[in-house]
Image (spheres, rainbow, N blue to C red):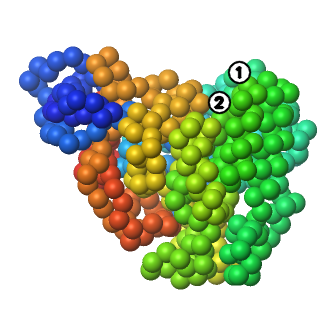
Amino acid sequence: MSYLIRNVSVLGGAPVDLVVRDGVIVDSADGTEEVMDGTGLIALPGLVDLHTHLREPGREDAETVLTGSRAAALGGYTAVCAMANTNPVADTAGVVEQVWRLGREAGLVDVQPIGAVTVGLGGEKLAELGAMADSAAAVRIFSDDGMCVHDPRLMRRALEYVKAFDGVIAQHAEEPRLTQGAQMHEGDVSARLGLTGWPSVAEEAIIARDVLLAAHTGARLHVCHVSTAGSVEVIRQAKARGVRVTAEVTPHHLLLTDEAVGGSIEGTAPYDPVFKVNPPLRTAEDVEALRSGLVDGTIDVVATDHAPHAAQDKECEWAYARPGMLGLETALPIVLHTVGDALGWDGIADRMSRTPARIAGLDEHGHTPVPGSPATFTLIDPQARFTVDPAALASLSANTPYAGMELPGKVVATFLRGKRTALDGKAAA
Ligand SMILES: NC(=O)N[C@@H](CC(=O)O)C(=O)O
Ligand SMILES: [Zn+2]
Ligand SMILES: [Zn+2]
C-alpha cells in the first residue's frame, strides 16, 4: 500500500504532503496512493518505549505480545523494549528469540527484547548476556526490572560485561533492605493511611552507587522509572561529571502523586490498588522536579513501564495487589497534558522517539518523517480530547489509573516501515 497524507504538519512545521511508498517517505505522489487528509494533524517519528511489560511467556491472561503490540500501535509507538520479568524469565537466547519472533509475527511494532541481568532475576549469578547479545534478538539492554541488581559486585561485573558490545544495564533502583514490606511512598500520606513506606532514599542510594560504578567501569547505565527529586539531582551531578548515564520517567510519575492512594482523584476511593506501582507515586515536589528534569534533559526519555495485571491480581485488597499500571495507550496524552507546552513537538519527538531509539540502538526508529526517511511515524490530532475508558483499551488488562479522565491528543494513525499499523482507534491485526 502507498499513501498520500495531505496537509500535515511535521513536528509542528508548515503543512506539507507526505507520500509513503515501499516502506519509505518519497518526494512525490504518482496517483496510486490512498489519500488521507492530514489537516490539523501533527506527524511525529514513531514513538519508542524503552520499558514495556508484555507478560508473554507466562501471563498471557494479562497481556500477550500481540495485544501489547496493538496497544502500542494505538498509542503511536513503532517499537517497544520488552522487559525480561516473564515466566520463564528472558534470561536465555531461547526466550529472547521467542519474544522477538512473536513480535515479528504480530507485525505491529518492533518488539526488542530486554535480557535479564541475572539468572531467573535471582540476583546471584549473571545470565548468559553474551549469548542473548549474539542471538537473533540482538539484545543490547539488560535489566532485572521488577527486582534491583542490589549486589554491587554483580552490578559491577554486569556493567563490565556489556561494555564490550556497547550494551547497557537498565536498573530498577530499589535498595531492598530499605523497602521491606513497603506499600507506598513514605511520607505524610503513608503515615495517615497506616501503610508501610517506600522511602525516596531507597531509590536515590542505588542510583548514587550505580553512577559511581558506571564511572568506574566506563560502561553505560540506564536508570528505570526515576521517581524522586533527589534522584534527578544525583543524575544531574553524574552527567555533569561525564558519567555515561541515561534515565527515564514514566507518564504516571509526571502526573500523579501519593495523594491518589488516599482517594484524592475524583471517582476513586482510598486504597484503590490501581494506584499501587513501583516505584510508588511520590509528592507534588517530586512531580515538579521530574517535569523540569525531563524538560532540561537531565532525564532523557519518557518510558511507559506499561505493566498490565489481570483483574484478580489488581482488584483485591491493597496489600495483595500487584504493583503496576497500564501506559502505552495514554502515554502521549499524559505527556502533552503535563509537559507538552514546555517541550514542544520537537522536544516530545526527542524524549519519546529519537533518544529512546538511540539508547536502544534501534537505528530504523527515531527519524523525522521527511522524504528519504523510513515511513515509521505517527499522526496526532492535538485538538481532539477523549475520556479514558478502561474497557475500551486494546490491552488485555484494564488497570489504567486514568479511568474517566479527559485527556488531550488522539493518535489518528501509526505507520511502521510503510505499513499502517493503526487507524482511528483500530489496530491493523
Ligand atoms: N512497575 C511496577 O509496579 N511493576 C512492574 C515491575 C517494575 O517495573 O518494577 C511489573 O512487572 O508489574
Ligand atoms: Zn521496575
Ligand atoms: Zn517495569
The residue that mark 2 highlights is: 140
Q: Does residue 305 appear in this view?
A: no
Q: Which of 348 and 279 lies nearest the eye of the viewer?
A: 348
For the N terminus, the image quarter is top left
Badge 2 amino acid: Arg
Badge 1 amino acid: Phe
Question: Residue 120 placed where, x, y %?
Answer: 77, 49
Q: Which of 65 and 169 lies nearest the eye of the viewer?
A: 169
- Residue in view at x 77 percent, y 74 percent: 196
**Residue situated furthest left in the rendering:** 31
Snapshot quadrant of residue 39:
top left
Image-based side of 86 in relation to 356, left or right: right
- Residue in view at x 45 percent, y 66 percent: 402
Image-based side of 305 in relation to 88, left or right: left
Give yes or no for contact between labels 2 and 1 (Cβ–Cβ under 8 Å): yes
Compute the Cα span from label 2 to label 1. 8 Å
The residue that mark 1 highlights is: 165
